[in-house]
Amino acid sequence: MLDYGTLRLIWWALLGLLLVGFAIFDGFDLGAAMLHPFVARKDVERRMVINAIGPVWEGNQVWFILGGGAIFAAWPPLYSASFSGFYLAMLLVLIGFILRPVAIAFRGKGETPLWRAAWDWIFFVSGLLPSLLFGVAFGNLLLGVPFHFGEGLRFAYEGDLIGLLRPFPLLAGAISVAMLLMQGSAWLAGKSEGAVAARAGRIGALAALTLVLLFLAAGLWIAVGVEGYRIESAIDPSGPSNPFGKHVTRAVGDWLLTYARHPVSAFAPAAGLVGALLAAVTLAAGLNRAALLASSVATAGVVTTAGFSLFPFLLPSSTHPDQSLTIWDASSSRSTLGLMLAAAVFFLPIILAYTSWVYYVLRGPVTAAAIERGDDHYY
């Protein structure tokens, strides 16, 4: 039987895995939506972009649902605090997710250029809005979120939506947009053909290089201008889930402590940088399979860099640092984590297996000729 501290670490790693899966798989859906008005100039080209993600986007969103479910079950205080504090931001994200299928479905209900152009731009917004806000959310985590717990662990959030849009979180949002543009470009370059694939490759190479520059800028900013969080009191990995039982200090550079204590974690930012550079080269050279692999490695590296930097914090408090939520004091009970782990070990391979099968069945590019023939299964 695994001890409580080990179960907490495993679920922290599983949560990271789900976030990486969401960023890679639904990331190219979001990226394709953002690219849609720029890589496709004719109606048949726009339909190629939509059909490149049309059969898989719903399945890809399962990663987001699993991530939310994991937070709800494994880290209840984190779920209540984050979904309450970021309520308006999460509402905007959900609006973006809702707009995607609406735009895909309603675009084909009319044939006038104005009608389709309007839904094309709504489709673009459905990709841009969540991409930007996810990055802004991670940026705010690194700065700290203004919240505290009152009597009876009643959560109190002291910020607002405008307060989330500070310079560093906006930089993090730009990183997220560049990263998902790269991922969407890598997907479209291999899933489409002709001019669409060529334009996607060019935009993707530029997005990958932009990601490298923005990622380096964020790292430098964190090193010299962002106060990180550190637990100064003794840590009991198997102790009770009580956010009041620790002392936390803040100092510039403390977010880099994980890399000093565990040098192996430096592979995360290295993967983000090297993967993005390789994605830029392979996209420019038309090596589409290699580009998607490199882009996915870069995406995983960027997401895990945020996780390693925050460790062991899940939601730092900027107003009451001692009440910050960490993996050691915000989890469910040992029995709950153990039962959930058994379920994850059983169901996660099934999800991966059917996802792999779907992508195998749907392999190959979407062609203009097939769309123009009027095949029933195309949008």
Image (cartoon, grey):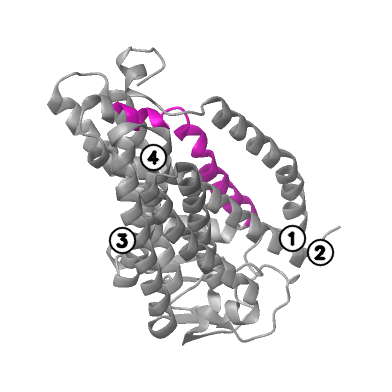
Q: Could you tell me if residue 16 is visible in this image? A: yes
Residue annotated with mark 1: 7
Helix, strand or loop under label 1: helix
* Cα distance in 3D space between marks 3 and 1: 34 Å
- Circle nearer the N terminus (2, 3): 2
* Cα distance in 3D space between marks 2 and 4: 46 Å
Q: In this picture, which residue range is highlighted in magenta?
A: 47-74
Helix, strand or loop under label 2: loop
Residue annotated with mark 3: 161
Helix, strand or loop under label 3: loop
Q: How busy is the neighbourhood of tag 1: few (under 14 within 10 Å), some, or many (20 plus)? A: many
Residue type at tag 1: Leu
Label the magenta part by its dominant secondary structure: helix
- Circle nearer the N terminus (4, 1): 1
Q: Nearer the viewer, residue 318 or 189?
A: 189
In the rendered structure, are the residues bearing label 2 and label 1 in contact, judged by CB atoms less than 8 Å apart?
yes
Residue annotated with mark 4: 189
Q: Residue at x 39, y 65 (%)?
A: 212
Q: Quadrant of residue 126 in the image? A: top left
